[in-house]
Each structure stands twice: as C-alpha cells, then as structure tokens.
Image (cartoon, helix red, strand yellow):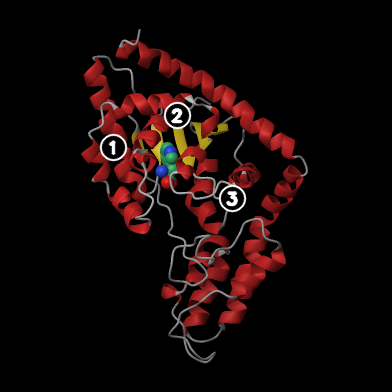
Amino acid sequence: MTKQGRVFSGARPTGRQHLGNYLGAIKNYVALQDNYECVYCIVDVHALTTMDTTLELKQNTYDMALDWLAAGIRPEESIVFIQSHVPQVMELHTYLSMVTPIGKLTDLPTFKDKVRENPNNVNYGLVGYPVLMAADILLYATDFVPVGVDQAPHLEFTREVVRSFNYRYGAPVLKEPQMKTTSIPKVLGIDGVQKMSKSLNNHIELASTAEETTQRVMQMVTDTARIRRSDPGNPDVCNVFSLHKIFSSQDEIDMINVECRRAGIGCVDCKKILAKNLNAHLEPFRSRRNELDQNPAYIWDTLADGAKRATVLAEETMTAVRDAIGLP
Ligand code: TRP
C-alpha cells in the first residue's frame, strides 16, 4: 500500500529498554510502519550534551537497537540508524544556527530544566540541542514527528526555523513538519508514583527473564490505602490495575475491577495474574531478542545500512540547502 508520508523520530541511546519506553514510544514506532515511511534514529550526538562519560555509549546504542528490532521495527522497510553516522546533520545544524536568535533557545522550558538539573554543565551544545533536533527532522524532509508533550516546544521551534530559513534564503527548501500526538499512556514505575525510568531504578526491563519480571511485578506498589488483605481496594488509583488494562483479558480486567473493590482478590494474586500476562506478552520479544543477540554483526550491519539509506536523503536536502544559501 502507498504510505501517507514520512515519519521521523529520534531517541537517545539509553541502553536496554523498559516497559515505559515500550508503551510510550517503541510500540507506536512499530505501528506507524504500516502507514508511513519511517526513519528512526539513535541520537548519540544529542546524548553527549548531558553525558560525563562515553564509556557505555556503544553498548547502550547496541542494546537499544537490539530491543527496537526485537520489538518489531522492520529495518528493510524502515530506516534505522545512528545519528553520528550521517554527519550532514551537524552541517545543517550549523546553517540553522545562523537563523536562530539565541534568546529563543535559552527561553525554552526544556533548556531551563536542563540548567536546573545540571548547573555546572551548561555547554554550548546543550543550548543548541533543539537546533540539532530540528536538523534531524529537516534533513530527512519529514512530514510527521511522533512526540510526547515534553517535546512539543522543540517541534514548534523546528517549524519556526523552517519559516526563518526559507524566508531568509528566499526558497522553500525546508519542509515544515507536523507534530503527531498519539494518546500515549503515562507509565509509572514500580513505586506507583514516579514515571518509569532507568535512573530511578523503578523500571521493568523488556529483556529481563520471566522470573525477574515476576519478581519486579511482585514489588509493585498498589493502592496505598489498602493496608490489610481484608480492606477493599481501589483499582482506579492502582498502578497494577493500569497495567492490567493493557496486558490482561477483558474478563480478567472486569473480574479484578469487581473483586478488588470488595476485597475478593488480594494484591498478591492480582499481581500474579499481571506477571503471567506480561510474561506471555513479552515472550515473543524475548526469544526474538535472544536470537538477534547471537549475531551482533547483524545489528551493526543493519545500522550501517540504515545510515547509507539515510545519507541519500540527507544529501538531497543538503544540496538544496547549500544552493539556497549561495555557498560558493
Ligand atoms: N529530543 C528528543 C528527546 O529527548 C530526542 C530527539 C532528538 C528527537 N532528535 C529528534 C525526537 C528528532 C524526535 C525527532 O526525547
């Protein structure tokens, strides 16, 4: 079937992916392939803006690519590659920086957050982070960018840069992308309070064994008002129940919804059902991942092939860009 345009998304190489990454991004990446020409990029250069060591960068890149492919990203059909393998993005970043007022970058809420988090490392690259992100998106003549609300200011910035650039150089060389918001569930960690994240160690890794996954599920915090087994619980405020809604059958969801409220089922049994369903859901992922992991060269070759195909698109844009600017 004919595709409805090009999608681009980037993610920092955070290593082995967790349930939050899966439900918040990867699942959507996989689904988008059916209707769009997809370009998925591991943004290693962006990662450098906040990193104090690069020791794990390669391994984290490999692990993320492995998880993406095991989860169903199809590299023959989609382009999957590493940002730094197509250095034209750095060139475009430089040209875009000439039409970017610096105040616009320092005013961004994302920039202010980063400064607050790490006041001792406010580097030049960090200020230019959204310019590099715009270069990612524009280099591949993207139609749609699937992003969460936290990235919305960056996408709006990208659209503004397109207008400034095209106006400044008098030619419509860059394409204005649309933001593609999908209803993405906010996945909480096993603490039931904070967003699932590796740095908080409240995550459930996709690549964990069934036993490890079950252990993690059994540690999940439930409705904190339910203290004794005989207390009625409230599924509406329970993180375990939120995951049941994604991974369990309608019958099980209905049963828990009723039985929890009248203390007919306890948290331990409720979690056991979730662990069983989660493991069943992840089983095909795990076996595919193990299979792919037997041959690391395949992962690196796939990423190299992606970079090659991305370079073709990149050069097309850069030829037009250099020409529009009037570089000698
Ligand atoms: N800034 C994004 C994040 O932190 C990552 C990213 C880099 C990105 N380049 C992109 C996302 C291009 C979408 C499109 O999550």
According to the image, label 1 marks what residue? 157
Residue 19 in view in this figure: yes
Q: Is residue 245 above or below residue 60?
A: below
Q: Picture coordinates of residue 15 (x, y %)?
A: 59, 50
Relative horizontal placement of residue 93, taking residue 272 as reference (left or right): left
Q: Which residue is mark 2?
A: 6
Marks 2 & 3, CB-CB < 8 Å contact: no
Q: Identify the amino acid type marked 1.
A: Phe
Q: SS of the residue at dot 1? A: helix
The circle on residue 15 is 3
Question: CA separation, marks 1 and 3?
Answer: 28 Å
Q: Residue furthest front?
A: 120
Q: Amino acid at mark 3?
A: Gly
Q: Position of residue 96 (x, y in %)?
A: 32, 27
Q: How many numbered dots are placed on residues in this image?
A: 3
Nearer-N-terminus badge (1/3): 3
Mark 2 or mark 3, earlier in chain: 2
Contact check, label 1 and label 3, Cβ < 8 Å? no
Instruction: Give the image quadrant in which the ligand numbered 1 is located.
Output: top left
Query: Could you say which is closer to the camera, residue 194 or residue 73?
Result: 194
**Drawn side of residue 289 relative to residue 5, left or right:** right
Q: Residue at x 35, y 50 (%)?
A: 150
Q: Secondary structure at mark 2?
A: strand
User: Could you tell me the amino acid type at mark 2?
Assistant: Arg
